[in-house]
Amino acid sequence: MNRILLLMAILFCLSATSIYAAADDVRIMELPQSDREQMQVVWSKLGTDGSALMVEFKTHSNFKTHDSRLFKYDTITGTLIFNHSNFLAATDKSRKTALKSFMEELHKSKVSESTQQSITNTLRRTSTDLSAALDPIVTDSDETYIYLALRILSPYLDVIRLILGIAAIIIVLFLVMRTVLDLVYLGLPFARELMEVRSQQNGKFRFVSSTAVNSMKESETSIGSANYKNVYVLYFRRIVLRYIILSICLGYLALDGIGQIIKWLLNTYFY
């Protein structure tokens, strides 16, 4: 009797283990209501009821199943199901093809970014093998859009350089003229009086920067005190960073920096 009870206990444990393994084998992701319609669109592009997601099994795996799909989608409950047993038993080529097909359609769809990220994270957490298989697919999908953007931009580099060159010339001329007028305002009292009179009429200085005006006010306030502040020192201290940044940008633009960056990206990562 004891032997029978012991045998029954062992069989129960084995059956319980099998039930757990089967339950653990399928990863379920229930989609938000707002994304279910878009996921249905994704699913419709993956063959008849996900036929494009079927995998081939390794010859030595001896794995048998009536459903070789890697994913299933329940349109009624909005549940996406991943069959991990099929993934483990599948050949590397077929499971990569199925994963790539699903991820590319998902990436191109209007399913929300948060749901897409949730699906990706759930798949990554399923197993280290799946995460390793998923990494290059997700990376390739992201790089595809970068590649397309760079390829679209590449033929127009000459036009972009021309536009940026014209813009750079206009900016330089503007800053030079503004600096000259600032120095006239700071160095010539009669010009400063004239500009101040016109500013009172117009409500503001038209051709003089606020940096020059504030520097003059601060310098005049310090006259007669022990801590006198030279107006030119104040002014150039406040604009020097602006000109350093402008010089770096213009220098890099003159050396065709933008074109070189795009060409380097294309040659390094995509060719």
Image (spheres, rainbow, N blue to C red):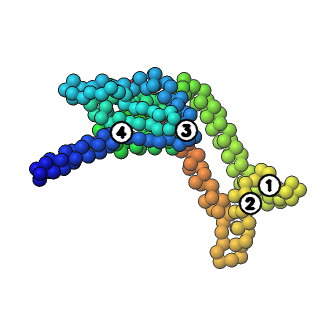
| Disc number lying in front (4 or 3) | 4
Residue 221 at x, y percent in the picture = 73, 71
Give the spatial CA distance, label 4 vs label 3.
21 Å
Sooner in the amino-acid sequence: mark 4 or mark 3: 4
At label 4, which amino acid type do we have? Answer: Val
At label 1, which amino acid type do we have? Answer: Phe
Rendered position, 7 above or below 215: above
Q: According to the image, label 1 marks what residue?
A: 205
Residue reaching furthest right? 201
Residue 6 at x, y percent in the picture = 14, 51
Q: According to the image, label 3 marks what residue?
A: 35
At label 3, which amino acid type do we have? Answer: Asp
Give the spatial CA distance, label 4 vs label 1.
72 Å
Q: Is residue 256 left or right of residue 196?
A: left
Secondary structure of the residue carrying numbered label 1? loop
Give the spatial CA distance, label 2 vs label 3.
57 Å
2 and 1 marks in contact (CB < 8 Å): yes
Give the spatial CA distance, label 4 vs label 2.
72 Å
Q: Which residue is depicted at the point 24% across and 29% down?
A: 63
Q: According to the image, label 2 marks what residue?
A: 213
Sooner in the amino-acid sequence: mark 4 or mark 1: 4
Sooner in the amino-acid sequence: mark 2 or mark 1: 1
Residue 26 got which mark?
4
Q: Alpha-carbon neighbours of circle 4 within 10 Å: few (<14), some, or many (≥20)? A: some
